[in-house]
Amino acid sequence: MNNYVGDLMNAYYQCLNGNVTYGGQDVNVYGVGVAQDERFHYIHLRPESENDLSNKSSFVTSAVIVVDIYTVHEGSIDYSVVEDIDRQVRQLLFPTRTTTGLADASGMQITISKMENSVYLDGFNGTRHEYRKVTRFFNRINQLN
């Protein structure tokens, strides 16, 4: 059985990176690490879990990828910003009801990808407000070889 979490993370990154904007400006997408000098809205991707669902006939992995949308606000929080970015993310990940925008890597096939749940967080770091939408996406992967 192969480990496809890295390939799945890459599929999410490739799908979203360079394709999400707000106010005409690109919304950066980061993997595990985020640039310390980031001052604009951004998306932070990270794997949350991985489970073996294999059976007698095939290797199957389930993995949860977290899409954490950070929005930054100098004054009061504009809640619509995070929803606009989230709407773009979902349109990219699920262009139609029966397809996903995620590319299969060599040797893997993503058979299910769906949104599980979201939570909202807000905070203030002394100079600016942050408002976040943290969404968990469940994925089922079949190993092809």
Image (tube, rainbow, N blue to C red):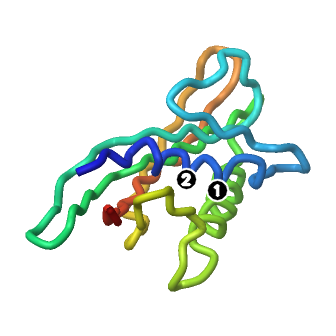
Q: Residue at x 63, y 59 (%)?
A: 89
43 is higher (above) or lower (below) than 24 = above
In the rendered image, residue 101, in percent from the top left (x then y), is placed at: 60, 67
Residue at 29% x, 48% y: name it. Answer: 2
Rounded to the nearest whole Å, what is the CA distance between mark 2 and mark 1?
6 Å
Kind of residue indicated by mark 2: Ala
- Which residue in the structure is indicated by mark 2? 11
Q: Would you place residue 97 above or below residue 65 in this image?
A: below
Instruction: Point out which mark residue 57 bears.
Output: none
Figure check: 102 above or below 31: below
Q: Provide residue 132's location: percent of width, then percent of height.
A: 55, 42
Instruction: Say what amino acid the circle numbered 1 marks.
Output: Cys
Q: Is the residue marked by circle 2 packed among few (<14), some (14-19), or many (20+) residues within 10 Å?
A: some
Q: Nearer the viewer, residue 125 or 89?
A: 89
> Observer-nearest residue: 47 or 89?
47
Q: What element carries label 1?
A: helix
The furthest residue to the front: 145
The number of numbered badges drawn on the structure is 2
Residue positioned 65% across, 69% down in the render: 91
Q: Mark 1 points at which residue?
A: 15
Quadrant of res 33: top right
Q: Is residue 36 left or right of residue 97?
A: right
The residue located at (62%, 32%) in the rendering is 130
Q: Is mark 2 on a helix, strand or loop?
A: helix
Callout 2 touching callout 1 (CB < 8 Å): yes
Q: Up-down: is 66 above or below 140?
A: above
Q: Determine whether, in the image, residue 65 is placed left or right of residue 76.
A: left
Say whether residue 71 is left or right of residue 94: right
Q: Nearer the viewer, residue 42 or 51?
A: 51
Task: Residue 66: give x, y in percent of width and height.
Answer: 44, 46
